[in-house]
Every structure is written in structure tokens, then in C-alpha cells.
Image: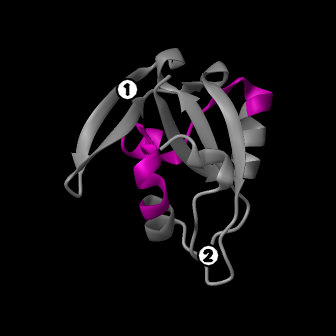
């Protein structure tokens, strides 16, 4: 299984379960949902989500995603982008993702075996 990850607010994920599909603001503004590979997730979290509370990481089986996934360059690395809404059945695990006291993130134990 090729896992990609997406960080979101817990409330947004809970709302998606009521609607039946997940979307992110970036889908409207940039045309895709930002995702990361496991080795990139902490760098992304500490850069864009520093000190934010109430987050979760969606573990996504990329082979189950119905929308197109493109790996595109950003900051010298290839990041997975989902070009469309995310079907909920592609998400196989949701991990609570809270920062440490200093506002920085560490890889949760549940995600360590993905590397």
C-alpha cells in the first residue's frame, strides 16, 4: 500500500464524515488537496501548523483515491497532491496530532512504521 498523509483540523474531518467526502480550502484556492509522504509530514507540520491544536493526520491509501494524484515539486521535493475531493473510504486511519509544549510536532508512534 502506498500511503500518503494529510493534516487537517479534527472538526473538518468530522464534518466530512457527515457529508460523505473530504475537501480542503486549498482545493478551491489552488485546485488540489496538499498531502505529504511520511518522511515529509513533520517538516510540513512544523512549517505550516506550528502551535496549532486539534489536528489529525489522515492516512490515505493512494490506490483507493478516486481523484487524480500528482506528485509535484515544491521546495526541491515531490509532494502528492489530490486533484479533487477525497473519497472517505481511501482513509484507512486517523491519528490525533497535537504539538509538543514548544509548539513543534513529532511523528506519532502510530505513523512510525510507515517510513
Does the magenta portion include 84? no
The answer, for residue 76, to whether it is visible in the render is yes
| Residue 9 % position (x, y) | 67, 53
Residue carrying label 2: 51
Q: Is residue 15 above or below residue 67?
A: below
| Residue 83 % position (x, y) | 39, 28
Q: Residues within 10 Å of mark 1 (few under 14, many from 20)?
A: some
| Point 47% across, 44% down: residue | 115
**In the foreground, 39 or 55:** 39
The magenta segment: 17-43
Query: Residue farthest to the bottom?
Result: 102
| Point 37% across, 37% down: residue | 80
In this rendering, would 73 be left or right of 81?
left
Q: Are marks 1 and 2 in contact (CB under 8 Å)?
A: no
Q: Is residue 30 above or below residue 106?
A: above
**In the foreground, 26 or 72:** 72
Lower position in the chain sequence, tag 1 or tag 2: 2
Residue carrying label 1: 69
How many tags in the picture? 2
| Residue 69 % position (x, y) | 37, 26
Amino acid at each position: 500500500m502506498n500511503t500518503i498523509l494529510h493534516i487537517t483540523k479534527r472538526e473538518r474531518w468530522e464534518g466530512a464524515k457527515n457529508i460523505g467526502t473530504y475537501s480542503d480550502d486549498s482545493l478551491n484556492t489552488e485546485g488540489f488537496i496538499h498531502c505529504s509522504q511520511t518522511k515529509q509530514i513533520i517538516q510540513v507540520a512544523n512549517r505550516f501548523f506550528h502551535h496549532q491544536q486539534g489536528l489529525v493526520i489522515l492516512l490515505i491509501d493512494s490506490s483507493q483515491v478516486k481523484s487524480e494524484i500528482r506528485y509535484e515539486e515544491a521546495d526541491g521535493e515531490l509532494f502528492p497532491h489530490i486533484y479533487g475531493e477525497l473519497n472517505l473510504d481511501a482513509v484507512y486511519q486517523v491519528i490525533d496530532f497535537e504539538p509538543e509544549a514548544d509548539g513543534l510536532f513529532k511523528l506519532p508512534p502510530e505513523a512510525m512504521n510507515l517510513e
